Image: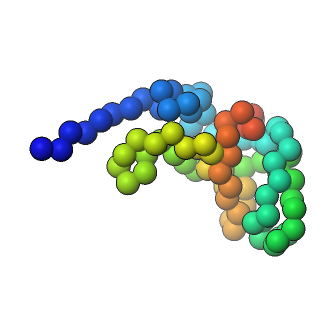
Amino acid sequence: MAVEMLVEPQKLGVNVLMKVGDRVRVNESVVVYHHPEHRSQAFDLKGSEGEIVDIVTQWQGRPVSANLPVLVQFSKKFKAHLRENELEII
């Protein structure tokens, strides 16, 4: 018999004030190498604005404590996983 476990998002270290659909701004220096306009070059996201499209608390139906739980869409072609302390709600 399978037992399902429900874990509240705040117990997994995710800020419950942030939710899918919120507009956010990167408030710390975060360097990425997968930005489509700067392919294979260092690109700092500080000051970039986007929308939260997912907060990762589960993977394949199991609770996880992701170290980069907030998925932000910055443009049509660019998304990045970030920590909640790297973002501010606008």
Q: Position of residue 88 (x, y in %)?
A: 75, 34
In-image side of 59 versus 24 (left or right): left
In-image side of 1 versus 46 (left or right): left
In-image side of 54 versus 61 (left or right): right
Q: Position of residue 22 (x, y in %)?
A: 63, 40
Q: Position of residue 16 (x, y in %)?
A: 55, 28
- Out of 33 and 50, give the one closest to the viewer: 33
Dividing the image into 4 quarters, which one contains the C terminus? top right
- Please give the name of the residue rendered at 86% of the width and 59% of the height, measured from the top-left corner: 43
Q: Quadrant of residue 17?
A: top right
Total tally of numbered discs in the picture: 0
Dividing the image into 4 quarters, which one contains the N terminus? top left
- Please give the name of the residue rendered at 78% of the width and 48% of the height, measured from the top-left corner: 49
- Please give the name of the residue rendered at 35% of the width and 49% of the height, measured from the top-left corner: 61
- Please give the name of the residue rendered at 55% of the width and 48% of the height, measured from the top-left corner: 54
**Residue 20 visible here:** no
Q: Is 11 drawn above or below residue 43 in the view shown?
A: above
Tell which residue pokes out farthest to the left in this image. 1
**Residue 39 visible here:** yes
